Amino acid sequence: MKISCISAYQVNLPLKEGSYKWSGGKSVSVFDSTIVCVETDCGMKGYGEVCPLGPYYLPAYAEGVRAGIRELGPHLIGMDPRELSQLNHRMDAAFKGHPYVKSGIDIACWDILGKVTNLPVSILLGGRFGESVRLYRAISQLPPDEMAHNVNQYRNEGYTRFQLKVGGDPDTDIERIRAVSAVLGAQERLVADANTGWTQHEAMRVVRAVKDLDVYIEQPCLTYEECFAIRQHTNHPFILDENIDSLAMLMRAKQDLAMDVVNLKISKLGGLTRARQARDLCVSMGIAMTLEDSWGGDIATAAIAHFAHSTPEEFRFTSTDFNSYVTVETALGAPKRHQGFMTTSNEPGLGITPIPEVLGQAVFEISS
Ligand SMILES: [Mg+2]
């Protein structure tokens, strides 16, 4: 079996809430997502999706996904898509860095492997743990009372984990954390994710001011060293995200005891093959994880579900159902949230079927 064609589709994903705002005044109202199709010489197709959180979250941007695939794709024509390690080895040899460019291709090849073996990707990634995957809801940055209102609404939809977008003015952020904490019950969990937005002294003030509350602190500052300084001055459970973009950083943070939970995003690490490697290492090292991606629609959500469902439950802190945030359905068969949880498809591969009218014409096709 050989890869005969790689094509990319561009899809706009408007947000149901109108916009998504996080630290430093950053916001997105329509996500620009790339759906990657890998086709084989026997006519089988696999799909993946890459959707950066705008151009100012991670070193990734929507047009970069497509530009990168144009550069990388020709090196992969003729390769066997079932041989995931070989494929990733070739991708790394042909194209230095840019893990997010590789992610959609890798996911599409897992989809093919599942279809060829007649197995869901979750089984290929190690097998399913438990019946369903617990989800968190990201709460867009707004005035404190509005964020508390939104948390209450999403509680009514069954969510039990909430990730507040803070990283703005530290005094307002303290109010945000207090306002939301006041509406939560003992079984619920609150994460204050600053997305690198606080300087070190601001972060120090915030963690001290919310010392009495049960809240996790995620990625307070820009650099690993600043985050580590905050970590050493707080008893709050601590999550690293943006800084953990490689196995080397994961190992370093574990060695330093710099986090209690790590946020693994599929495209940040370069696809399911690399994300699984980091995930399995976290399980061996005893670190719980948020298992997700930077953003996306139905196909990204399906990939997240398979990735998360194949992770032991005690190490699954949360995951995300991005397809419920956006107004456009791009594929049939994707997981649908039920009472704050989602379940992986039993169908082969990712278990999704893209909707051709939504994908439209391919932006480009690379073939031999
Ligand atoms: Mg985060």
Image (cartoon, rainbow, N blue to C red):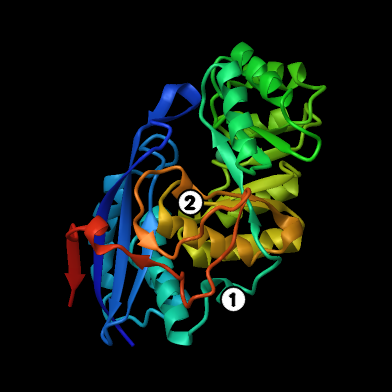
**Crowd tier of the residue under label 1, counting other residues whose Cα lies within 10 Å: few below 14, some 14–19, many 20 or above:** some
Find residue 6 and report its image quarter: bottom left
Q: Position of residue 126 (x, y in %)?
A: 63, 74
The reply to whether callout 1 and callout 2 are in contact (CB within 8 Å) is: no
Assign a secondary structure to mark 1: helix
Disc 1 to disc 2, C-alpha distance: 23 Å
**Disc 1 target residue:** 123
Q: Amino acid at mark 1?
A: Ile
Residue 284 shows up from this direction: yes
Q: Amino acid at mark 2?
A: Lys
**Crowd tier of the residue under label 2, counting other residues whose Cα lies within 10 Å: few below 14, some 14–19, many 20 or above:** many
Is 340 above or below relative to 173?
A: below
**Disc 2 target residue:** 268
Q: Position of residue 247 (x, y in %)?
A: 59, 56
Is 135 above or below relative to 331?
A: above
- Residue at x-position 30% and y-position 84%: 2
Is label 1 within 8 A of ligand 1 (CB to nearest ligand atom)?
A: no
